[in-house]
Image: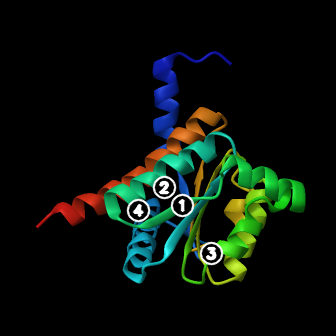
Amino acid sequence: MMMQPMEWFDALHGALTQSQCRIQGEPAELAAGLNTLGQLLAQTQRDGASVWWAGNGGSAALCSHLSQDLLNKLGIRSQTINDPALLTCMSNDYGYEQVYARPLSVLARPGDLALLISSSGASANILNAARWARDNGLKLATLSAFKADNPLFALPADAAFYLPCSLYGHAEVGHEALIHAVIESLWLQQKTP
């Protein structure tokens, strides 16, 4: 498939505008999902709770970036669990499928928010972390792409987002845009007197 740069942008725009959302496992409008994510972040901040981020590859880099934005712009306790030494330790001792669930089981507390990203929505380590978070009193927000029937989007979450695209670049930039929209909206609200 050939694609010119402007066609790439058009496809990204299409994926963003056609994004799907579920709130508590039920289909919802994208605006409602973004508002729900904003409410989850605001509640996390009010409660003095933490946001825990996890993703693989480019999604891990995205998690690091957006975690810093939450800390810097909104003053929310926000941390990634993708430190290389931690990942290799957990992978060695518990298997790569538990590389995120195991640190969450030690570090996270009920009322915290797990924000998990998987382009395929099928990464076993992200799915295990999502299930652990859901089963242990954490709030859960997920982002996925590629196939609408992916297991991460199907997993009941406080807010789940799906981008209908087939390129990693669209998935990663699209996920970043969705979360930036929420973070910067909250930041602008806080700046308004």
Instruction: State left or right for residue 58 relative to residue 5.
Output: right
Q: Tell me if label 4 and label 1 are in contact, CB under 8 Å.
A: no
Q: Earlier in the sequence, mark 2 or mark 3?
A: 2
Q: Amino acid at mark 3?
A: Ala
Neighbours of disc 4 within 10 Å: few (<14), some (14-19), many (20+) = few
Across and down, in percent, residue 116 comes to: 62, 59
Q: Amino acid at mark 2?
A: Ser
Which residue position is annotated with label 1? 79
Helix, strand or loop at disc 4?
helix
- Residue 108 numbered tag: 3
Residue lying at 45% horizontally and 20% vertically, measured from the top left: 6
Vertical arrangement, residue 29 with respect to residue 25, above or below:
above
Q: Tell me if label 2 and label 4 are in contact, CB under 8 Å.
A: no
Helix, strand or loop at disc 1?
strand
* Whether residue 156 is visible: no
Which residue position is annotated with label 4? 31
Q: Amino acid at mark 1?
A: Gln
Across and down, in percent, residue 167 comes to: 64, 33
Q: Tell me if label 2 and label 1 are in contact, CB under 8 Å.
A: yes
CA gap between label 4 and label 3 equals 28 Å
CA gap between label 2 and label 1 equals 6 Å
CA gap between label 2 and label 4 equals 22 Å
Neighbours of disc 3 within 10 Å: few (<14), some (14-19), many (20+) = many
Along the viewing direction, whichever of 29 and 90 lies nearer the viewer: 90
Residue 92: name its quadrant: bottom right
- Residue 67 numbered tag: 2
Q: Earlier in the sequence, mark 2 or mark 1?
A: 2
Residue lying at 59% horizontally and 33% vertically, measured from the top left: 169
Q: Earlier in the sequence, mark 3 or mark 1?
A: 1
Along the viewing direction, whichever of 90 and 7 lies nearer the viewer: 90
Q: Earlier in the sequence, mark 4 or mark 1?
A: 4
Instruction: State left or right for residue 90 relative to residue 117.
Output: right
